[in-house]
Image (spheres, grey):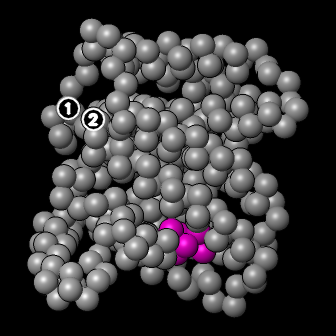
């Protein structure tokens, strides 16, 4: 098989695995908080990638820390939103992140291309159809998913420039993943773990037992997300994009929400109505139109 086709095939695998992360996380949101899911996923991935930080330079690390801070907020919004809406609906709204970089360029003075206007029209129509339930039903979970999409777009725009500034891409990748894990741990201590002496003595044992049970129940999901969907897939994605064009990668990535909906059906039994399917098709069309002629090398470091 030619190297180019191997690269395209690698990106197809990446997109399929990304699609599984939505139902894998959705299954846990009824028990574990977003902070615990993010912490476990990125701590496992960070431990695997820790050797890449040996003798790393600060100029590479600082960009990884900044990217990690934004990425942490992305995942908190994504998982909190997942707890309040379906996995396939969350995936399609989150997938709108591909429209954010060109819109940020517009704010910075770039011209609005016709393909972006067409993509926005398709996206708005798709969202309307996806969220139509006898009326336009938009909930808090959808708002969180949209915030996630906006932040993912900012993250991709940031990575577009930082990947050209660093010496070692794997240092950038490892440092941002570990930053996400540290942020999740701090957020957990500040917002969730009993902190007062009275609360600690009374509630902490029960809290620890509750979390330990959740980690046992969903240990397979967490290991899968951390080892396969984060550490391994980022490496495969980087290699795949090295041997394929940016346009090919962008078109392949646009089908991630469709993969998520497929896995949500088989994994969670979630189904989509005819108008939701129409909305999904319009959203995918908008994503493809928006990215058809846009270089997107930064996506090599944008795990889902």
> Range of the magenta residues?
175-180
Q: Where's residue 105, x and y in %?
A: 79, 36
- Residue at position x 57%, y 47% in the image: 152
Viewer-proximal residue among 3 and 212: 212
- Residue at position x 55%, y 58% in the image: 71
Q: Which residue is mark 1?
A: 270
Q: Is residue 302 left or right of residue 130?
A: right
- Residue 300 seen in the current view: yes
Q: Where's residue 196, x and y in %?
A: 29, 83
Q: Where's residue 21, x and y in %?
A: 35, 50
- Residue at position x 65%, y 35% in the image: 100
- Residue at position x 45%, y 75% in the image: 186
Residue 221, compared with residue 124, is above or below; it is below
Label 1 SS:
loop
Mark closest to the chain's N terminus, 2 or 1: 2
Q: What secondary structure is the stretch in magenta mostly built from?
A: helix
Based on the displayed image, in which of its 4 quarters is residue 42 positioned?
bottom left
Q: Which residue is mark 2?
A: 86
């Amino acid at each position: 098989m030619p190297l180019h086709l191997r690269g395209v095939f690698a990106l197809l695998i990446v997109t399929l695995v990304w699609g599984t992360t939505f139902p894998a996380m959705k299954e846990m949101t009824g028990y574990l908080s977003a902070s615990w899911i993010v912490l476990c996923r990125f701590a496992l991935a960070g431990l695997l990638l820790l050797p890449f930080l040996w003798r790393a330079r600060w100029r590479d690390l600082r960009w990884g820390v900044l990217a990690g801070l934004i990425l942490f907020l992305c995942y908190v919004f994504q998982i909190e939103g997942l707890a309040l809406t379906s996995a396939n609906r969350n995936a399609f709204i989150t997938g709108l992140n591909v429209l954010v970089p060109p819109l940020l360029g517009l704010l910075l003075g770039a011209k609005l291309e016709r393909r972006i206007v067409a993509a926005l029209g398709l996206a708005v129509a798709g969202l309307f159809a996806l969220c139509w339930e006898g009326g336009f039903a938009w909930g808090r979970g959808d708002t969180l998913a949209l915030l996630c999409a906006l932040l993912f777009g900012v993250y991709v725009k940031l990575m577009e420039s930082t990947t050209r500034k660093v010496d070692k891409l794997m240092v950038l990748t490892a440092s941002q993943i570990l930053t996400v894990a540290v942020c999740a741990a701090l957020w957990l201590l500040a917002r969730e773990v009993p902190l007062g002496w009275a609360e600690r003595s009374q509630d902490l044992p029960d809290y620890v037992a509750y979390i330990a049970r959740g980690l046992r129940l969903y240990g397979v999901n967490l290991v899968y997300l951390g080892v396969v969907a984060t550490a391994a897939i980022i490496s495969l994605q980087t290699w795949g994009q090295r041997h394929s064009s940016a346009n090919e990668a962008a078109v392949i990535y646009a089908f991630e929400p469709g993969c998520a909906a497929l896995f949500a059906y088989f994994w969670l039994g979630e189904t989509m109505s005819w108008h939701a399917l129409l909305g999904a098709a319009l959203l995918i069309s908008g994503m493809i139109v928006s990215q058809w002629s846009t270089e997107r090398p930064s996506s090599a470091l944008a795990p889902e």
